[in-house]
Image (cartoon, coloured by chain):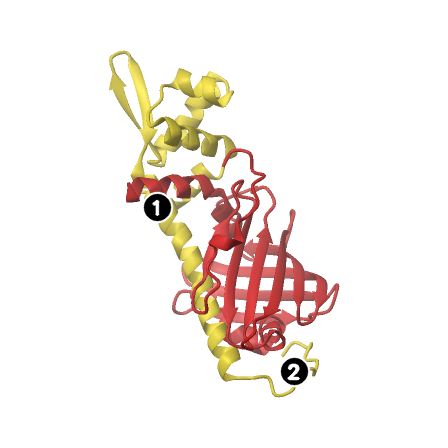
Amino acid sequence: MTDGSTPTDLSTLDGRRGSTRIEISDDGSSYTCVRTFGAPPERVFRAFTDPEDLRVWFPSGAPPGSEMPVCESDPVEGGRYHYEMIVPDFGPMAWHGTYTHVDRPDRLDADEWFVMGGGDPEGPPTAQILTFEPTGDGFTLMTMRVDMPEPEDPEEFMEQSAAGLTSSLATMDELVSG
Amino acid sequence: MIDTEIVLDAVGEPNRRRLLELLHQQHESTVSELVAASGLRQPQVSKHLKVLAGAALVAVRADGRHRRYRLDGRGLRVAHEWFASFEDVWQARFDTLDALVSTDPDPVPEHSRGDAP
């Protein structure tokens, strides 16, 4: 875990339907998530980019009482997206994104700025790559890769903080299991 | 009660993560051993160990005139739980997304719906 150059081994990720697991790269600068969805790529692509669909699934997992007052998405190259959530005890959280590559329904890239507390987006963005591969049975294998800039303020940037936990997680796993 | 933000802040710094890795490998180390292994200067190592100890990520015991540092599971558990909640969010989101796309096939897949509602 010290050289940071080891690529993420996707074979260890679970792509079965119903299972979501996040794998963090050894240097903590990116994470990858693989998941199978029960619909063809065109439908899954739409779910990731259509505001009406996003409003259904994106707030899932947020604490009760959370709201999503803003949900905009223009899935063309150079187009923007903007989601905002109000989460009890956390206040406003916003996701500002620019689609950098749109190849419907196979691939969707974006630069994203995550902002807590209602400020303007600033600093380097995270870079996201989503790919949607058809499986033989009409389902979709999605791979989400998120590259994170060096954390500037781990307390404020949740995603970046998550990346920073790599080493403690590895040690944690052995500590609690051994 | 260990403060999650203090733990996350502590592990957010690369040199401190390096020290955690070294302690994991060595099981127990003195400051001078950590200085030799990390390439950091002694005052830096001491400063980082103080932050890690404050976050319950490392524990220290006196052994004669040496102070020996090792990992402390309490802070690591907080970090682990925090990360698990992050993973849980994606799991919940994707479960809902899966339910959406598998029960509501798109009747007009090629139709552009780029406008915000």
Protein chain holding label 1:
B
Label 2 Cα crowd, 10 Å radius (few <14 / some 14-19 / many 20+): few
What amino acid type should be assigned to the residue bearing mark 2? Pro
- Residue A76 versus residue A23: which sits nearer the camera? A23
The residue at which mark 2 appears reads as B109
Q: Position of residue A66 (x, y in %)?
A: 44, 68
Res A69 label: none
Chain ID for red: A
- Residue A61 versus residue B108: which sits nearer the camera? B108
Label 1 Cα crowd, 10 Å radius (few <14 / some 14-19 / many 20+): many
Q: Is residue A21 left or right of residue B60?
A: right
Q: Residue at x 69, y 65 (%)?
A: A80
What amino acid type should be assigned to the residue bearing mark 1? Val
Q: Nearer the viewer, mark 2 or mark 1?
A: 2
Q: Is residue A131 visible?
A: yes
Q: CA distance from mark 2 to mark 1?
A: 44 Å
- Residue B117, placed above or below residue A154: below
The residue at which mark 1 appears reads as B78
Question: Chain B hue?
Answer: yellow
Q: Is residue A58 visible?
A: no
Cβ atoms under marks 2 and 1 closer than 8 Å? no
Q: Is residue A117 left or right of residue B89?
A: right
Q: Earlier in the sequence, mark 2 or mark 1?
A: 1
Q: Quadrant of the C terminus of chain B?
A: bottom right
On the image, which quarter does residue A75 sit in? bottom right
